[in-house]
Image: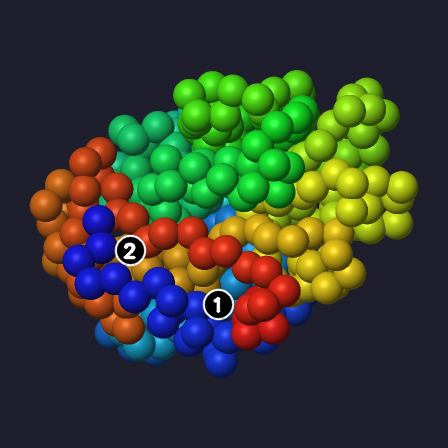
Amino acid sequence: MKISNRPLAAFAGLALAASIGLTACGGDDDGGSGGSGGDGGGDITFLPKNLGNPYFDASTTGGEKAADEFGGSIEEVGPDQATPDSQVSFINTAAQQGVGALVVSANDPTAICDALNEARDAGVKVVTFDSDTDPECRDVFVSQADAEGIAKKQVELIAEQIGESGEIAILSAAANATNQNEWIKLMEEDLAANYPDIELVDTVYGDDDDQKSFDQTAALLSKHPNLKGIVSPTTVGIAAAARYLSTSEYKGKVALTGLGTPNQMREFVKDGTVTEFALWNPEDLGYLAAYTANALIEGDISGEEGDSFEAGDLGSYKVGADNVVVLGEPFVFSKKNIDDFDF
């Protein structure tokens, strides 16, 4: 729960601050990407689903900004591929190094639980962000937005773009991704309750791999010739799907929306392949996750419901039910505003 909300201000701030390249944080041979920060705060390790993903590059940039402010340090490590147990070795290494906190976007809700709990037994605070583990495996989950709000916004966008009638499909990330599966479940419920003329005919998985997501888009359109829209709630998937659509016979005929970054989607919005998509501010998400981790390290919060803490420029936050802190509401990007953002 956010006590003092400023979602639009946060995005405007990002537009001024961020200029993030595809290789800004990923691909180190040792799996690390350097550190940030100074003296006095906690040592925090960021562990995204995989390296080389612009979305997580942005969240780590936010974490580094926060660490600079509270005097901590950030190191990013992670696997090249977002497979269920690929994060385990990085968790074990961080625990052995005695870091203050791990900030993790989980590839699987249970596969990394044993490693995380061993780290917690060794005194490491565990914050999940973006994609949660089972609640008993972490201290706090920093959610990008309320899951219902994310699902509802994506359904609202695709419904508007296809005139609330016709066949749609979902191109997701990994089949085990907690956040994706929760959003898909809620989208299915919203469609059934409020959009009787829209039929969800298929859900496929690109595993957050560009080529696989591209191929899955082609396969969907071949398998479902009457498809009117695709929802891809993953930044890798929506960009790959847009790339396929933009040079195909389906451009302008099959709608595409979901969750993407402005820099990935700009050319496809401007060429008419995509009209609107949504996302939260990933830099703010990393910023808030770092402040949450530092609050745990410093003993300002224990992670229990009702705990509150200050998160720099974002203001005050309160820990809600199930030890969850929510960043804010999704934001819609279109041709009208996409040039205002740079991430």
Residue 43 x, y percent position in the rendering:
34, 62
Eye-nearest disc, 2 or 1 = 1
Q: Amino acid at mark 2?
A: Ala
Going 65% across and 53% down the picture, which residue do you hit?
Answer: 275
Whether residue 152 is visible:
yes
Vertical side of 81 occupied by 221: above or below: above
Question: Which quadrant of the structure image shows residue 67?
Answer: bottom left
Q: Is residue 140 shown left or right of residue 208?
A: left
Q: Give how far across and how far down residue 63 sits, in percent.
A: 41, 64
Return the disc, 2 or 1, that comes first in the chain's sequence.
1
What residue is rendered at 34% in x and 42% in y?
Answer: 146
**Extreme left residue here?**
306
Judge by depth and name the residue closer to the eye, 219 or 99: 219
Count residues near mark 2 (Cα–Cα under 10 Å), then give few for <14, some for 14-19, many for 20+: many
Q: Looking at the picture, how far across and down is residue 273, in whole percent?
A: 75, 52
Mark sitting on residue 293: 2
Disc 1 residue type? Thr
Of the numbered discs in the image, which one, if any, rests on residue 61? 1
